[in-house]
Image (cartoon, grey):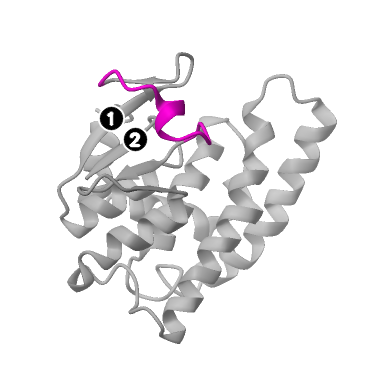
Amino acid sequence: MKLYYMPGACSLSPHIVAREAGLDLELDRLDHASMRTASGEDYRALNPKGYVPALRLDDGDLLTEGPVIVQYLADQAPAAGLIPAAGTRARYHVQEMLSYITSELHKTYSPLFNPASPPELRAERIAYLQRRYAPLEERLAAQPYLHGAQFQVSDAYLFVVTHWARALRLELLSALPALQAFQQRVAQRPAVQAAMRAEGLIK
């Protein structure tokens, strides 16, 4: 399998999941300016959506959208416990959380990366994030991970998205001690460190 990624982007989430699962994964870095990959591929021809992640399977099929990719990867190594079995209520709760992170957190960060975003928009988005993090803060105050004691795919996604607050130098987490502790806890996991090191995010 090959994962198309950009360092620190949402593609870091499936990268972490693959390492947690012990799966072999080839990495191909996308240069956003040229839209070509390190291996020389035209990324728009490969994935007309034009953004990462994308996962090329061994038979040539291509999966896109991070919440789908992490589920696929976790299902390849069920013994790793990264996602409940398909069809169980616990699986639907993980999918519920993946959807929440995608719609309420991930996309809210997007204008904050755009230097042309006006100050009033930035302030509104930060306030929105604070409200949307509140239920997660309450949950993480009572348990180490989003669904209890077991690290799962939704934890990888939350970690990556929330790491953007640091990259953007936002003070979002100052009033969220449980979320801060979660970020530190996940950052210490060997698979997370290996993925971040491979992407050049840490030494």
Name the dominant secondary structure of the magenta segment. loop
Q: Is residue 60 above or below residue 179?
A: above
Label 2 element class: strand
Q: Residue pushed farthest top? A: 34
Residue 183 lies, in percent from the top left, at: 42, 51
> What segment carries the magenta color?
39-51
Query: Residue 2, image x and y in percent?
Result: 25, 40
Say whether residue 189 is visible.
Answer: no
Q: Nearer the viewer, residue 167 or 84?
A: 84
Foreground residue among 86 and 49: 49
Residue 4's label in the rendered image is 2
Res 3 visible: yes
From the viewer's perspective, is 71 left or right of 114? left
Please state the horizontal and vertical placement of residue 25, each as a whole percent of the image.
19, 44
**Residue type beneath disc 1:** Asp
CB atoms at circles 1 and 2 under 8 Å apart?
yes
User: To which quarter of the image does residue 119 belong?
Assistant: top right
Q: Residue at x 46, y 27 (%)?
A: 44
SS for callout 1: strand
Q: Which mark is residue 28?
A: 1
Disc 1 from disc 2: Cα separation: 5 Å
- Please, is residue 137 above or below residue 22 in the view? below
Q: Earlier in the sequence, mark 1 or mark 2?
A: 2
Left/right placement of residue 168 relative to residue 132 reads left
For disc 1, the neighbor class at 10 Å (few under 14, some 14 to 19, many from 20) is: some
Q: Observer-nearest residue: 102 or 86?
A: 86
Residue type marked 2: Tyr
